[in-house]
Image: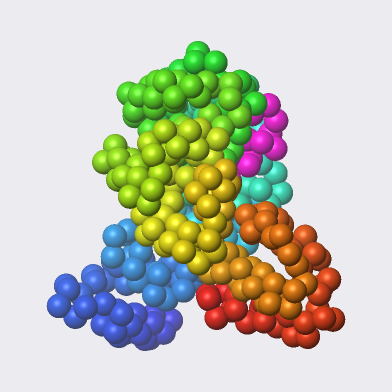
Amino acid sequence: MASASMAWRNLLSLAQKRFFNTAVTLPTASSSFTAEHLIKTCGLPLQPALSVSKKFQIDENNLQNSQAVVGFLKSHHFKDAHIAKMIQKCPAVLRCKVEDNLEPKFDFLIKNGFEGQLLPQLLMSDPRILVCKLDTRIKPCLELLKPFLGSNENIIVVLKRASWLFTYSFKSCVQPNIDFLVKEGLPLDKLAKLLMSYPRTILIKHDRMVSAANYLRNLGLEPQAPMFIHAYRVMVQLSEPTWKKKIEAWKNVGWSEGEILGTFKRFPFLLSCSEEKIVCMMDFFVNTVKLGHQTITANPSIFKYSFDKRIYPRYNVLKVLESKKLIRDRKTATFLKISEEKFMENYITKYEDKVPGLLEIYGSIRKTKGL
């Protein structure tokens, strides 16, 4: 046994020299033992185990706790891959006390709808949940979300997407923002949609949230409006200098400020476009496709599509069909906006017998342009 253990540690030492810069101080015997334990007990691959062992140590004389944690996770149907991923992300989980820490949290989460594979999925997404306090982090999170989201299914949607919500102080950070939006008149179904679609937007500084809501009101966009949460999301994700740069970028391609803000109210994604995309797409629509300015401003959704994957391939199909005199009086904006299913049905399948290889032309252009 002693010789086998020595051989193992020699292997670890060799691997450490290969994987890490030799200028760095070589790991201690304690870190070598930790790596060995992480590999054998927790299922981590060699390199991640070595990496974790540089910043996290396991006491060689007190293995019972980490072994109990692994056993507890397995008893709740966590697979080896689940456990390895969790420990790699948050090795401090191995220091949790099963009876005092893990059991109450698991009981609470299971009671609130995290059953079956939902529990491993949640905890793998952010295992720091298990080192958060149950009474001051986890419970307030669920208790605050449930009245707005209504069902465990909706809560699961949010927490699977943003499990890090458990790690924030709800009373000092999240609750004031939610209370403000409710007070401003945001309908509960819109708040639920905001939480499920853009959960990070409720974590911004309160002053910034108030400023964004006031700006949108001044534009005439009330919290009850269908586009409010989308416009709000765009605003809070952009710094003030970036917001101004986006406005200037649209002005530089011929839009007035009134057109920009008016379009933003009904299509907030307009100000999410990069400056490069704004310039390139406008150049293509104006100089190649020959769309008029009014047509472009009336159809802002064309800017949400990928040039490589949608705009350019469809435009080339349009040109082929026009050259064969198969379509006339085209409405290019509509041509670009219809669903892929409708596009295939109305312009590829419909004319493929008259234009042999049309599907291949469409597919090859999309592939060449980056698909």
Nearest the eye: 256 or 273 = 256
Q: Position of residue 117 (x, y in %)?
A: 68, 52
Q: Position of residue 261 (x, y in %)?
A: 43, 34
Magenta residues, start to end = 149-160
Nearest the eye: 218 or 44 = 218
Nearest the eye: 39 or 67 = 39
- Against 323, residue 212 (above or below) is above
Q: Position of residue 312 (x, y in %)?
A: 56, 69
Q: Is residue 288 left or right of residue 280?
A: right
Q: Is residue 52 left or right of residue 181?
A: left
Which residue appears at 38% of the width and 36% of the height? 257
Q: Quadrant of residue 306?
A: bottom right
Q: Quadrant of residue 323?
A: bottom right
Looking at the rendered image, the quarter that the N terminus falls into is: bottom left
Looking at the rendered image, the quarter that the C terminus falls into is: bottom right
Can residue 243 be seen by looking at this rendering? yes
* Residue at the limit of the structure toward the top, as seen here: 183
Can residue 77 be seen by looking at this rendering? no
Q: Quadrant of residue 251?
A: top left
Does the segment drawn in magenta span residue 144? Answer: no
